Image: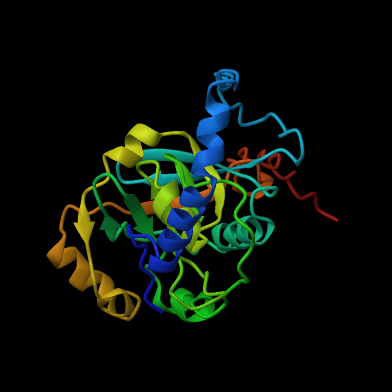
Amino acid sequence: MDVWINRRRIGKVIAAAVALVLTVSAGVLALAADAPAPAAPPTSPFTPDAPKPDGPPPVRVVLETTKGDIVLAVHADWAPLGSKHFLELVRDHFYDGAPWFRVLDGFVAQCGIAADPAANEKWGEQTIKDEPLKQGNKRGTVAFGKSGAPNSRSTHIFINYADNSSALDPQGFACFAEVVDGMKIADKLTRCEYNDQHGLGLKGGLATFKKMYPKADYIKRAYVKDDAAEKPQTKPQEDPAPKAKTDQ
């Protein structure tokens, strides 16, 4: 299933927005003179280990890329279905070796086609239902890509390079995570746009992609930072030397 994240808004959404502006503009202008100045937004940085006021603490996921590490904070309260599905994919090592096959200046960096064709066959058609958008597509946020069909989110994810909320929010791209470390790494991913998404997921597809984009970047490994199973294991102590046998 090909997945495209489109910069353009849907025509009906634009028309509805224009109608709404025309309807309320007179009232807004009348109130503008008496309205107090808006409060400045909070400037305190996001702390990955701190729980949100209305949700559980975020789960940290590390994307070890060929440019360096990108650390995500996955928010279950932003998109419960999307965050759960993403963690399932990470824990199944779906993204290990996956290429960043669509990296566009000022827009997004997209991946989500596994290096292993068997993984694409296993997960490619396991879609999840759409869910309400709670967090807009601002710079550094992460969402699942989808086709034009309802409930089509599967394995494709993208990092927003810019504030794409005006274009992507009306299309229902619900963010489930944000980059909390390594955004400079994400900005350096090699620009490319590979159109044969279906072929990329098949046997031999990755080799064809590498020939076209020899300098493309990849996710070498993705893992949940707090999972004990992913933490380095201490070297087990060697058994003491066996005692010499005594004659019976």
* Front residue (pair 107, 178): 107
Rendering coords of residue 125 (x, y %): 52, 80
The spot of residue 148 in percent (x, y) is 44, 75
Q: Quadrant of the C terminus?
A: bottom right
The residue depicted at 32 percent of the width and 56 percent of the height is 100
Asked whether, in this view, residue 100 is left or right of residue 24, the answer is: left
Question: In this picture, is 84 found above or below 206?
Answer: above
Question: In the rendered image, is residue 138 in sight?
Answer: yes
Q: How is the image coloured?
A: rainbow
Question: Which of 38/143 is in front?
Answer: 38
Where is 33 relative to 14, above or below? above
Q: Residue 226: which quarter of the image?
A: top right
Asked if residue 144 can be seen in this view, the reply is: no
Q: Residue shown at 27%/51% (left/top)? A: 217
Q: Is residue 239 left or right of residue 233?
A: right
Quarter holding residue 187:
top left
Relative to residue 132, is residue 152 drawn left or right?
A: left
Residue at (55% x, 31% y) in the render? 30
Q: Quadrant of the N terminus?
A: bottom left
- Identify the residue shown where x is 75% and y is 41%: 56
Farthest right residue in view: 248
Q: Tell me where residue 88 appears, x and y as whole percent.
A: 62, 62
Answer above or below: position of 66 versus 216.
above
Q: Is residue 27 above or below residue 10?
A: above
